[in-house]
Image (cartoon, rainbow, N blue to C red):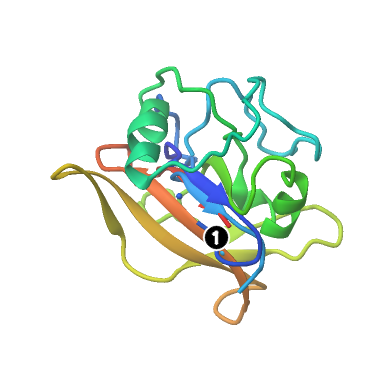
Amino acid sequence: MELPHPVKQSPPMELPHPVKQSPPMELPHPVKQSPPSPAADIPATVPSNDNNIPPTNYVSNFNFPVGYRFCPFDDELICHYLKKKVMNQKLPPSEIPEVNLYKHNPEVLSAKYRMIGQKEWYFFTPRDRKYPNGNRPNRAVGSDEPGVVNGYWKATGSDREIKHGSTVIGFKKALVFYEGKPPKGSKTKWIMHEFRVNDAPPLRSRINMR
């Protein structure tokens, strides 16, 4: 299973920015997600929650000051969140919960976490391999929630390097959510930015959805 890379989520615009290693399942790379408008590592302070998502009044166990906004740069997500997650080191206080994004339609997540972010959501999430002996990630989204349409995330381009100075420390990939089954799914306005550490295990990442 693969260590998750970091994630950030926001409203209908585009989905997204952020470990001790675990078996092939993969924590999505820092991901940033936002709600339909024009489509992580796992914080040590947040318990794992693969199937159930917290209530709409979810808040982290750290009291942030009034006016606080979580707006990290890509390299900050990698250095201070995703890489520390992968190395199983203590993370700084943040509002990055651990959620398996591939078990929930982004519409559901945006509603459940509407009290957390502004226009983007960040999650630490695992991801599975599409094939047992391969490195290709499984992008299918399967939910058993009543009335929820399943779908899949589709990459929109090649990986973009994230640098700290002149050193490549990670990569960022943009994906769009489609409802239905490939290759004939219906494109939505949800965009996700998936981050992964340069020297991290193959399938570990953090996700940013918006």
Relative side of 94 to 172, left or right: right
Q: Which residue is drawn at 59% across and 33% down?
A: 95
Q: Which residue is drawn at 72% across and 44% down?
A: 113
Which image quarter holds the N terminus? Answer: top left
Relative side of 58 to 163, left or right: right
From what the image shows, is residue 71 above or below residue 79?
Answer: below
Could you say where residue 110 lies in the image, as x and y percent from the top left?
71, 52
Residue found at the far left of this picture: 166
Which image quarter holds the C terminus? Answer: bottom right
Could you say where residue 101 lies in the image, as x and y percent from the top left?
61, 48
Relative side of 7 to 35, left or right: left
From what the image shows, is residue 48 above or below residue 127?
Answer: above
Residue found at the far front of this picture: 67
Residue 76 in view here: yes
Could you say where residue 71 lies in the image, as x and y percent from the top left?
49, 43
Q: Which residue is drawn at 76% across and 45% down?
A: 112
Q: What residue is disc 1 on? A: 15
Q: Residue at x 40, y 48 (%)?
A: 195
Front-most of 153 and 107?
107
Front-most of 111 and 154?
111
Q: In which quarter of the image is residue 85?
A: top left
Give the class, few, some or many, for how many residues have Cα within 10 Å of label 1's Cα (few <14, many ≥20).
many
Could you say where residue 91 lies in the image, as x and y percent from the top left?
46, 22
Say which element carries label 1: loop
Residue 127 in view here: no
Amino acid at circle 1: Leu
